[in-house]
Image (spheres, rainbow, N blue to C red):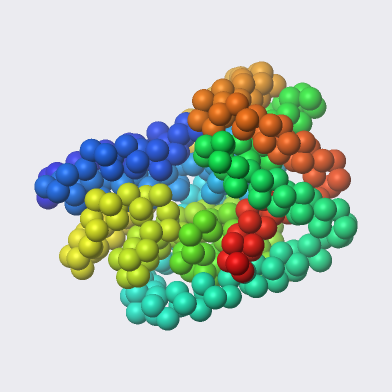
Amino acid sequence: MLELFLSFLAGVVAGTITGIVPGIHVNLIAAILISLAFKPYSLPLAVFIVSMSITHTFLDFLPSIFLGAPDEDTALSILPGHKMLLKGNGYGALRLTAIGSLLGLFLAMILLPFFIFFSSHLYGFIRKFMGYILIFISTVLILKERKKFFALFIFLISGILGLITLNFPLIKQPLLPLLNGLFGTSLLTISFIQKVKIPKQKLKKERISKKETIKALSSSVFSSTLVSFLPGIGASQAAVISSSFWKRINEKMFLVMLGSINTIVMALSFSVLYTVGKSRTGSAAAIQRILPTITSKEFITLVLFMILSGILSFFLCDFFGRFFARKITRINYRWLCFSILMLIFIITVTVSGPLALLVLVCGTSIGILTHCLGIRKMHMMGCLLVPTIINTLS
């Protein structure tokens, strides 16, 4: 039991690092662990991966909100999070995502028995109709936009960029330049050019009504369940699905929704591995390699440490949120943007190769164009939705 608890603590520390530091992902750590795994320590390693992965889903909103450096699961949080940061509510924005993550995790654990019972039936149905569901949802979101033609244009050119990037063999880790360009470097470039100044941050807790919270969580659970069964579809696509449920969704609801989706998708990926035997995330794939067959006792152990990781991560998120909120105003934000841009360029070349810079530049251009046209950034998720629709229909 002691080795499991130590693995849990080590996983939380690792998840905190991967969450806060841009460019370091849990999949990288999980891949390294696979090569080190051997049978006597299979369960402790699985506990480490589960704890790290859940912690990461809490902390990875911090760089996207405060620094404008997203990963594939937090890209959509940049716009509402950055807007709240410019109003002095960056800490409040981060706390909303943490609340969503914690409540989403608890809700997922409560519904877990039903999920396990119905998963075998849901798997075939969702796999068959997901392409059509995504087409319908994408159409609804475009029709909601006042500038429908421009929204469709942004959706399609983002989709074309995604298709080319994800199917180009010479670019490693293609999501890194793709999403950083569309959602990260585009915002950082605009902030640098416009000489954005960060106001003094308030350390107050943003309030959200019970009705808004329930709406955000209910749509999150539904969309997260849909995407949990299919490979290549994650939190970003689930967020697009959730957003289509409501005519209007405010910043606070959106952040709670994103936080809950991010954590629920990760938690359910381990449940899908246990029930269906399919891995839908890098972390689940790593556990599948370490524990080819998960027993009921082992699964209950993993669920327990998922819950413990979520509780501890909530307080870690609050601590680091306060720390960043105090320090961010002491830094020249224009030069911080420039430094992060350079860091993203270096990480992109190192991880994905020199050709990835072309993707990064194209994505940045589309992101800036979207901003200038006054179109919601969500339509740039066509970069993942178009390839997903084509793959599921074919």
Query: Closest to the observer: 50 or 328?
Result: 50
Q: Is residue 303 above or below residue 246?
A: above
From the image, which quarter does the C terminus lie in? bottom right
Among the 4 quarters of the image, the one containing residue 33: top left
Residue 329, image x, y percentages: 62, 24
Relative placement, left or right, of 212 versus 226 is: right
Relative placement, left or right, of 247 versus 350 is: right
Query: Closest to the observer: 260 or 316?
Result: 260
Residue 27, image x, y percentages: 41, 43
At x 45%, y 47%, the residue is 58
Residue 130 in sight: yes
At x 63%, y 56%, the residue is 387
Residue 89 in sight: no
Residue 211, image x, y percentages: 59, 69
Relative placement, left or right, of 177 versus 98 is: right
Relative placement, left or right, of 354 versus 305 is: right
At x 28%, y 60%, the residue is 303
Q: Is residue 299 above or below residue 202?
A: below
Q: Is residue 232 above or below residue 340?
A: below
| Total labels drawn | 0
At x 82%, y 40%, the residue is 369
Residue 196, image x, y percentages: 74, 27
